Image (cartoon, helix red, strand yellow):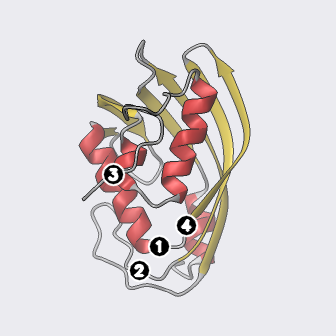
Amino acid sequence: MTTQSYGTSSPGQAAPTDSKQALEAQTQALNAHDGPGFASFYAEDAVVVDPQYPEPLRGRAAIEQDVGTFLKAFPDLEFSLIHTLVDDRLVAGEGKIVGTNSGPIQLPGADEIPATGRRLEFPMAFFSRLDEAGKIVEERRYYDIASQQEQLGLT
């Protein structure tokens, strides 16, 4: 599988010059449904705290698996970045995720749920800390799981 570069390391392509540009490039990778490209913005040993999981995601491979699972469940997923705040190596953002559940949903510690065919739309916020190389080393995500389950008819 060939992974498109979003400004992280491709020869002849300029890397993002600041954290905001990197975030915009990561958003582009997500909207291109490029799980490996999205995950490439995280350090190898990154930790992501996500309300969907009882324990943090640890490592780039786990993050790539997570986004791949989500994109499989919502193959038309679109992420809109609404607001960002950048302070050197700290990034805060607000966004909106929209997609149709046309693939199976795999929840942590649960059986696979068949596609509901329902549309999902929810706001979310995230806070990321970057290392000296501009890779995300820690991220905390915030969104309302109960609202998601209601929209999908799972409650």
Relative side of 134 to 2, left or right: right
Element type at marker 3?
A: loop
Mark in front: 3 vs 4: 3
Residue 27: % across, % down: 56, 47
Residue bearing mark 4: 77
Report, in whole angstroms, how far the alpha carbon at label 2 lies from the one at label 4. Answer: 11 Å
Mark in front: 2 vs 4: 4
Residue bearing mark 2: 103
Q: Considering only order in the chain, which callout, 2 or 1, is on the residue closer to the N terminus?
A: 1
Residue 103: % across, % down: 41, 80
Q: Which mark is residue 75?
A: 1
Element type at marker 1?
A: loop
Residue 130: % across, % down: 47, 21
Report, in whole angstroms, how far the alpha carbon at label 1 lies from the one at label 3. Answer: 17 Å
Q: Considering only order in the chain, which callout, 2 or 3, is on the residue closer to the N terminus?
A: 3
Relative side of 56 to 127, left or right: left
Q: Amino acid at mark 3?
A: Thr
Q: Amino acid at mark 1?
A: Pro
- At 37% from the left and 54% from the top, the residue drawn is 35
* Quadrant of image for the C terminus: bottom right
Residue bearing mark 3: 3
Query: In this orientation, which residue lies closer to the viewer: 34 or 55?
Result: 34
Mark in front: 1 vs 2: 1
Quarter holding residue 57: top left
User: What crowding class fits label 3: few (fewer than 14 Cα within 10 Å), some (14-19), or many (20 or more)?
Assistant: few
Report, in whole angstroms, how far the alpha carbon at label 3 lies from the one at label 2. Answer: 22 Å
Q: Amino acid at mark 4?
A: Leu
For residue 149, above or below residue 131: below
Does the residue at mark 1 contact the one at mark 2 (Cβ under 8 Å)? yes
Element type at marker 2?
A: loop
Does the residue at mark 3 contact the one at mark 4 (Cβ under 8 Å)? no
Q: Considering only order in the chain, which callout, 4 or 2, is on the residue closer to the N terminus?
A: 4
